[in-house]
Amino acid sequence: METLTVRVERMAPEGSGIGRSPRERSGSALDRAQGQVVFVPFAAPGDLLEVEVTASKSTFLRTRVLKVLEPGLGRVLPRCPLHFDPSRPGPACGGCDWQHLDYGSQLAAKKEIVADALRRIAKAGAAEVAPVKPSPLEWAYRNKVQVPFGKGPGASPIAGFYACGSHSIVPLEACPVQTDLSVAILRRVRELAGKLGWRPYEEHSGRGWLRHLYIRTNADNQAIAAIVTRDPSLPGGPEFIREMRSRFHQLVGLYQNVQPMKTSVILGPTWKTLWGSRGLTERIGRLRFFSSPGSFMQVNTGAAALLYDEALSALTEGGRTFPLVFDVYCGVGTISLWVAGAADRVLGIEENRAAVQDAILNCRTNDIRNVRFQAGRAEGLLSRAVRETPGPAAAIVDPPRSGLTPPVLRCLTAGAIRRVVYVSCDPATFARDAGYLLRSGFRLRRVQPLDLFPQTSHVEIVGLLDRS
């Protein structure tokens, strides 16, 4: 085992600390560590750490913490006992990677991660990044959880989150970022899985039946829950439904999702309603949004309102209004309806047809009449819509973590599009796509990070790009 001492300088986008070895070593593979970047998971800026090298590359080292020699100013004791601690044996839960940082340090690090991505990837060093807007809740903020099942002692079912860097399950009894209702539902489903003889799925062999548990809650303390299974059978189904309904009056719907593929993708294509409502309604600001289990909703309800306000503010920056606004990857219509008062017409585009049905219902529920939705791939629908638009128009995009595809980026450079509001959950892909738009005649006017994911290294971004 080769070790070295590292002073941590800052945080990397994937959540590790970044440092360099402060003293030279000779006679080993580590003699080139001087001047070499060292990545250290679960580090804090300012930490002096004794670390073990786990991977050595030509330009960087990957390491793990053995001992905290001097804690940085932002280091705190993690609230969760399953969070990484070098003095505790056993695997650490991989659900949260920044519980060891105080909240102010988390916000400062996230701002720097966004600014660094813009400098390195977008080549937009002059772009000003605003301070990160904090989440209204630092703990118990998540309204969604997806928990894998596995085999425990005696083949009994266990449930928890994957250990860091692996698919080994760390069993949990509590979780400080989840709601109490979600944790209680998880524990009861785990008990029933053992009672009903549900065999947990085995990734390596593809055998077994119970894969995951999916739970969503809302601000009214209601919940929906779905078991994710390998096939559509449901042994003991009536007893499972009866037990869950009798234990949780907050449940409004139970479902089964079938994922037959040997894959790490959690949800499969088939949903079955076992009992109750076909989805859950959430209040965000003055609006109500219904979403079926497979539709996307932000996991932090309070911070989602801040995000949508920021998107609206960017859209109307400088007092501008647009006859037409495209909302691309619109989901159940949250942003479309939020900005409807700032445009003559809003067209929401979404590939998930169930989400589009939810969005149409949400329009009616909130009595908003200048928004319509189309189901299909953004590449085709946006291209056709832009060709038919004389302009000027604006586009709001909220793509998945992988960012915008080249065809969508090309659509945004059409002359009719005068403003782009880019909502992103990944600084690197945001910077990549912003760089493309900058080279295509846009100017990055505003970058506002928001913290929708406290205790983790993830950050949400709203960027405003105007045609020069």
Image: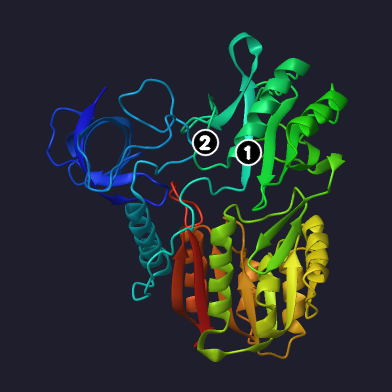
Q: Are marks 2 and 1 in contact (CB under 8 Å)?
A: yes
Q: Residue at x 45, y 47 (%)?
A: 456
**Left or right position of 326 against 8:** right
- Give the percent coordinates (x, y) of residue 306: 53, 66
Give the camera-side residue of 17 and 184: 184
Query: Crowding at label 2, few (<14), some or many (≥20) Cα neighbours within 10 Å?
Result: some
Query: Crowding at label 1, few (<14), some or many (≥20) Cα neighbours within 10 Å?
Result: many
- Give the percent coordinates (x, y) of residue 29: 23, 31
- The mark nearer the N terminus, 2 or 1, is 2
Give the camera-side residue of 244 and 75: 244
- Give the percent coordinates (x, y) of residue 155: 65, 12
**Left or right position of 49 against 191:** left
**Left or right position of 257 against 145:** right
Element carrying mark 1: helix
Instruction: Check disc 2 and report the residue beneath it.
Output: 175
Placement of 96 over or under 377, stated as above or below: above
Placement of 443 over or under 218, stated as above or below: below
Instruction: Check disc 1 and report the residue beneath it.
Output: 182
Q: Is residue 207 something that shows in the picture?
A: no
Q: Image quadrant for the N terminus?
A: top left
